[in-house]
Amino acid sequence: MSTLIALIIVGPLLASAIGLVCGSRQRLRDVVTVGALAGATAMAAWLLAEVERNGTVVLRVGGWDPELGVVLVADLFAALILVVALATILVVEVYAIGQRFTAWGANPQLAGPLLLVLTTGVSLAILTGDLFTLFVGFELILVSSYVLLTHQGRRGQIRAGMTYVVMNLFASTLFLFGVAYIYAATGTVNMAYLAERVPELDQGARLGIGLWFLVVFGTKAAIFPLFSWLPDSYPTAPTTITAVFAGLLTKIGVYVIIRFHTLTGMEDLGPVILVVAGVTMLVGVAGALAQGDVKRILSFHIVSQIGYMLMGLGLFSVAGVAGAVLFLVHQIPIKTVLFLVGGLIEEETGTSSLDKAGGLVATAPFVALLFALPALSLAGLPPFSGFVAKLALVDAGISEVATPIVVVSLVASIFTLLSMAKIWLGVFWGSPREDTKPAPTAAHVGGHRLMMSSTALAVAGTLVIAVLAGPLWRMSERAATDLLSPEVYVEQVLQ
Amino acid sequence: MSVALLFAVSGLTSVGIYLITARSLSRIVLGFSLLGHAAVLALLAAGGPAGDAPLADHASIESSANPLPQALSLTAIVISFGLTLFLLALARRQHVLTGDDLVEDDIEDQRIAHLEEVELGSEHDLSDKELDGEDADS
């Protein structure tokens, strides 16, 4: 079974190399890219089924002892997030193939292979069992994201790319310093050994490590006050790239925060995390209300939603962490879908600005439907997945008597709905402006159909999450129980 | 732990931080190189006392240095080398586009600065090009 883990990581990387030497044979590259992503997704689903039935799968790379070598660990939490993440990337790649016939498409010779490198980084960051491989996984994600963000070389992209790269590079350097500190304090970078040794350190060193890594991972996850690079850089990239970034990069940051801070038993940091979570929700949603562009509104919402996941972690109870896990599962596809719809809006109206677009309900009712469903889900209205996830978090908050954060989260939800209504008013109602729409060609129409159907598929996927809320919740609860008792993880990795 | 290493780490870190607060990307690149070195030295210092080269048939386990941080350092050095090149490429592209390599304000800052100008009665109109430069150029 552990071979699956290796294949999930190596497969996309190999496909990326093949994609790069394909040159101008675009069809072949598409087949390889989609094939690799579909294969990885299928294997991840198989892995999840296996983990669900028989427990954690551990791969010791090269047969080395965990003390010396690299271990890759697929527990329930990792396998669950991995499936959702890979499936999301697959949908985006199909959308990207459709979008290349339009003015907003990314350069296909680069985008496919780089997306595969990013996929490898995502899988590695999710599955890794030691801190340094996590660093390498992050770097894989970031380096490919730097290039994806700036490869068209437009002025806005370079401007935003510079801030993005400098911020993330700084966080990576801090990560490296953190690895040095933690190695000096404990003599290991393996997470299972860290789970044993960090709680034995004295209070000061332990909290120092916890806060340091909260800052490091928090910069990647865009928590308050480390988020300012995100709403500025994400909207400048081609839609498909932004969609992947929005759905995955920050969520991997959150995933790692949850993993690291539960494993090393940082319950004392709970109140700090809760305060950060509350401010992140409010500042993100306030920023979204002030914007006049679909992509920028959605980018601020990424920040706001990060707060909810941190809220679940900050409670440090099984219900809270399970809520955070479920929220993560709901958030990865929903955020991606909303950006994909943002791309469709650009496609239909020629702009993503609220002032310039209008009347899409009349001219493209299907796009309106595709926007409305995930938007209501994001705001947390029943019967969508967002409602289920938020209900779980609020419920956990109430049972922990953390009233302030519960109130803040509900207020932020109302504002989320308000800003979704703002997009609806600006883009879908009002009078249509057909003059901005470029004239379609035959290839254009085919590509457009592909974009539509992949978005529709993804929207259907988010609805499935709502339908499967019961089993998913039970799975999240099991994952959270394991996360909050690190000795389970330690035993499984070191046995 | 070696005091010399400690001083080297703190010196490199302070100069590096000073440089990355600059506006020009070429200074930031230099800053990151120094910070990268500082982080690698910190990793080495974390590995315990110095010793013989950790080769299997040349040193005993007692007398050799800790090889793990060295392996980690190598990886980190390679990554920071690649990223330095990427930053330089960005600086070059910015130079081609704007004639300098300065990191510009983000859109929100530009908007707020503009609001202030409007309040002061300055007449100049903020065109789309200034605000969302993404679409207007290339």
Image: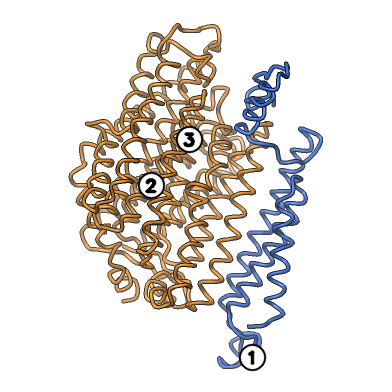
Chain colours: A orange, B blue
Quick check: A126 left or right of A326? right
Quick check: A101 left or right of B103? left
Report helix, strand or loop for mark 1: loop
What is the C-alpha distance between the residues marked 2 and 1? 46 Å
Picture layout, residue A461 above or below residue A319: above
Q: Which residue is mark 3?
A: A300
Q: Which residue is mark 1?
A: B58
Report helix, strand or loop for mark 2: helix
x and y, in percent, of residue A495 in the image: 31, 76
Q: Chain of mark 3?
A: A
| Amino acid of disc 3 | Phe
Q: Chain of mark 1?
A: B
Label 3 with label 2: CB-CB less than 8 Å: no
Picture layout, residue A462 above or below residue A420: below
Viewer-nearest of discs 1 and 3:
3
Along the line of sight, which residue is nearer the eye, A439 or A387? A387
> Which residue is located at x 62 percent, y 55 percent?
A170
Quick check: B136 left or right of A384? right
Marks 3, 2 in one chain: yes
Q: Which residue is mark 2?
A: A39
Report helix, strand or loop for mark 3: helix
Along the line of sight, which residue is nearer the eye, A477 or A308? A308
Viewer-nearest of discs 3 and 2:
3
> Which residue is located at x 40 percent, y 48 percent?
A277
Q: Chain of mark 2?
A: A
Q: How many marks?
A: 3
Quadrant of the rendered structure where residue A190 is?
Answer: bottom left
